[in-house]
Amino acid sequence: MRILIGLLAVLTLVFGAVSSRPVAAQVTYDVLIENGRVLDGSGSAWVRADVAVTDGQIAAVGDLSDAVADTVLDAEGLYVAPGFIDVHSHAAEGLTTKSLSAAKPLLAQGITTVVVNPDGGGAVDLAAQQDSLLAHGLGVNVGQLVPHGAIREKVMGTSDRDPTEEERAEMKALVRKGMEAGGLGLSSGPFYVPGSYAETEEYIATARVVSEYGGVYQSHIRDESNYTVGLLAAVEEVIRIAREANLPGIITHIKALGPPVWGFSSAVEQRVERARAEGVEVFADQYPYTASATSLTAALVPRWAQSGGRDSLLHRLDQSDLRTRIRSDMVENLERRGGAERIQFRRFAPDSSIEGKTLAEVAAERDEEPLTAALHLIEQATPGIVSYNMLDEDVERFMRQPWTMTCSDGGLVARGEGVPHPRNYGAFARKLGRYARDRGVVELGFAVRSMTQLSATVMGLPDRGRLQPGAAADLVVFDLKNVDDPATFRAPHQLSKGMVHVLVNGRVAVHDGTFTGVRAGRVLSASAE
């Protein structure tokens, strides 16, 4: 009996102790991505892991085989990466419209964040732009740059002169206002009007304001060919501004444009590496194409003829002596672009029939010399063009640099509108498919880093571009073997392929390759990240 009583006491103590232990509640995640090949954005090789998402953030990464989630996405055989960041985007205007705010062409490339107002153009009032961007919801996140050229034009028009002290102070005040509204940095376009009329010192002065806020200086450099100062001197100008203003400098959509500078990528690389060795933060971004896009006016018409704006240009073209001088200057500019066969029209509202045709083809149809035809078109409107002007060797050398980010330089337009550059639809997919998978120009992890962590770090977005707990749950799950960019220069309105799932701030925007209609994007600022 004593033995039985003792045994019962022991059993009571044991089971009593067990039953008194609190049972941990099982966590239920919002989204669980299982069995994926995880590329964390650092450039490292992929590792097999699960990724859990809760409340818009990455909650856990690793073996989560016992986890429970409201939505489970099977990523077996697929790659999981941070959402891609497009650091040079012209999508702002499209994103403010109800029909395009879902950003489907961007999501189809895996893009979850765009940085707008590049090249010195865009909204001067960033707060008002934010309201417009949020009016219909956003399919992707948006970061804003403060546009130097637009500010200069607001303060002093398109006059070819230095600002007065009062005008310089007003420009700096507008830059400060933009940064306080959440700007990520200053964009500039010394190649364009009116930015081409600004001296280096003007850029340094405005960039110093940006430096106070930890921002960047992103520049469409003064010359990507040999129009004026030359490609190498233009690169040195960015380096000087970054050094003297004490902030990161970005050579945006880096390229060697036209036969006179083909092969100069090596010399550009040397100058950037030398500056970085000296402690100057210099970066670049790039789209993976051998053709650029701009306006026919920007490509061919000399800057002196554009002083004062379009009305002044048209007035000069009405004067026979000035028209002859303008046309004479355009001869060299056309040669820099590789000739009339290398210029293709992408948008011309007065006559859409020329869209997709080259300047040579249009001139032949009209029985005119190419420059004569060009002037007649410019007098009607401002034709948008694609310019075939780069060598693959230069594109690939720039792409291999650890300081080069990925961008599209693309816009967001209605399907079927014009014949835009295919980068609008395919830039990021093209780099993954054509240059990483097929050609092996860069490793896959290296390519993803150029689209994610590098971009987020440079732009001051610390919780983006990283696949780690605590980071924002902007994620892309892609099928590498099926990644494709079917958009072409003649038929550009085609969505990229291969993005299986895309999450924006933890919400599924693309599921099994189908758009869900979710608009979970936000307007981002460095101060809020």
Image: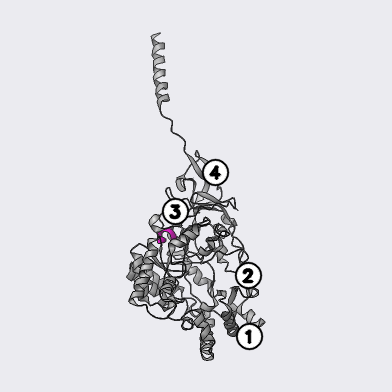
Residue that mark 4 sits on: 72
Q: Which mark is residue 368?
A: 1
Residue that mark 3 sits on: 466
Gap between marks 3 and 2 measured at Cα: 36 Å
Residue that mark 2 sits on: 490
Gap between marks 4 and 2 measured at Cα: 40 Å
Q: Amino acid at mark 1?
A: Glu
Say which quadrant the C terminus sits in.
Answer: bottom left
Report the front residue among 432 and 500. Answer: 500
Q: Position of residue 416 (x, y in %)?
A: 63, 65
Gap between marks 4 and 1 measured at Cα: 62 Å
| Circle 2: element type | loop
Please tell me whether residue 355 belongs to the stretch shown in magenta. Answer: no
Asked if residue 23 is positioned above or below residue 270 in the image, the reply reads: above
Q: Which mark is residue 473?
A: none
Asked if residue 137 is positioned above or below residue 263 in the image, the reply reads: above
